[in-house]
Amino acid sequence: MMKRKLPINIDDLLHHRTVESERIEYKAGWNPESILHTLCAFANDFHNLGGGYVIVGVEEEKGQPQLPPVGLLAEQIDAIQKELLNLGHSAIAPHFHPLTATYEIQGKTLLVLWAPGGETRPYKAKTSLSSKKTDWAYYLRKHTSTIKASGENERELMSLAATVPFDDRYQQTASLNDLSPYLIREFLQDIGSELAADARELDIEALGRRMNLISGPIEMALPKNVGLMFFNEHPEQFFPATQIDVVYFPDGPGGDRFEEKEFRGPLGRIARDAVDYIGRNYLTETVIKHPDRPEAERFWNYPLAAIEEAVVNAVYHRSYEIREPVEVRITPEELVVLSFPGPDRSIRLKDLQEGKAVSRRYRNRRIGEFLKELDLTEGRSTGIPKILRVMKDNNSPAPLFESDNDRSYFLIRLPVHEGFADTAKVTPEVTPEVTPEVGRLLKVMKGDMGRSELMLALNLKDEKHFREHYLQAAIAQGVIAMTLPDKPRSRLQKYQLTSLGRKLLVRKDFK
């Protein structure tokens, strides 16, 4: 029996850490008819959630797995896999075959069936495997149950025929060479997948099919869009404007000055990098001590968790068929995240403002899966409620959510905390006094600059003197920061002004 692994951590799967309970079904033993209907429902993927998993060898009680597992014998698994192959050809139409893998949990062997959302839905399955009749029906998932589609649900399923979300379609202009094995292995390592151990031994086609990143027959295998978005160093070559632009207006949108930084690359990386960049450069915490109580009051101009949710929400829900980047605009009064297009028309803006909106169908079912694996989003319409909650916890004004009647865009406004509002356009009184050397360094900083660029701009040749009296002193005082703080000796290391450094530069008495 071959022991294959899927691109997911089995412990996370059993405890619903990255996959919702409605996408998992537990079976103590092999029940082919019931499992066939569930696989059909996952293949139909009515809500574009990304299909689901059947875990055979685990009992279930009220939707929860009962551990230790029952487990399966090796000969049972071999027989099940052969029967699955036959069922995929004869009992479900169009033909559909789940990916299978075995796992050892608490000394027992489990069989996991992964049924991604199908590319040729709607799918129907035989209603009975024992009856001589050849009745067929369409099946859907409703919460944690598999049901036979009927009435309005069946009509809506028919309308989804051959409509596969953009991120799950294959890209005819690309080849398997456009998928980076290094990025795939890095991802598997990050999420703790057991497939990471086997990844180096698999060729790109075998690995891509195991992760459902590749589609098509053996003679014409092509990468899916989601694979290129996450596992190609330059996805913008296939999907123009796949980027996040962060623009800072220190004097407001009407001012003459602005700073701009573009983030391009794999979606998971640019989402993290953009949020980290904003956090390092534009977020400030204030501490106010009150004479009438011992506790000091702490608050941020913008809470980082709200920004992360807003940015990741834009990456998750934007359309990659529209050639417009995600844009983050920062002014002294607010931080705005803009993406295209807007939410589905079935979602009312009033419900969004109250954190009550629930999407029935997701634009990018596969992008959401990968973002959840990276712990960048929880999915299931939890982003907006979290933004509302963390803004409230920071005592910030309520965020605003905007779109037009055509839902052509979606905009999230995060107002600055009122404690910063009165001083947002003027330089704070409390700024550090710096040495003449650090002052000179700040004046030559233009965007992200490397060590040699800075020495050239300062007309310095003694590297030790520059490092000790300029660079290290400035970092120690918090007025500049490394772009790669986790890799201080990297050859790609550069330096940038912090928000404190920018505030110091605009002080009237700064020389």
Image (cartoon, rainbow, N blue to C red):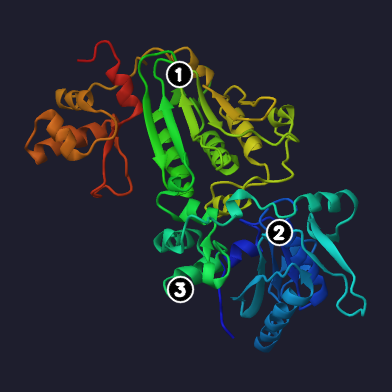
> Of the numbered discs in the image, which one, if any, rests on residue 23?
2
Label 1 to label 3: alpha-carbon separation: 51 Å
| Residue drawn at (69%, 31%) of the image | 352
First-in-chain label (3 vs 2): 2
The residue beneath circle 3 is 202
State whether residue 254 is above or below residue 71: above
Q: Residue at x 80, y 61 (%)?
A: 62
Relative to 390, residue 60 above or below = below
Report helix, strand or loop for mark 2. Answer: helix
Residue drawn 85% across the image and 50% down it: 155
- Mark found first going from the N terminus, 1 or 3: 3
Mark 2 residue crowding within 10 angstroms, few (<14) / some (14–19) / many (20+):
many
User: Where in the figure is residue 424, as x and y percent of width and height?
Assistant: 44, 16
Mark 3–mark 2 CB contact (< 8 Å):
no
Q: Secondary structure at mark 1?
A: loop
10 Å neighbourhood of mark 3: few (<14), some, or many (≥20)? few
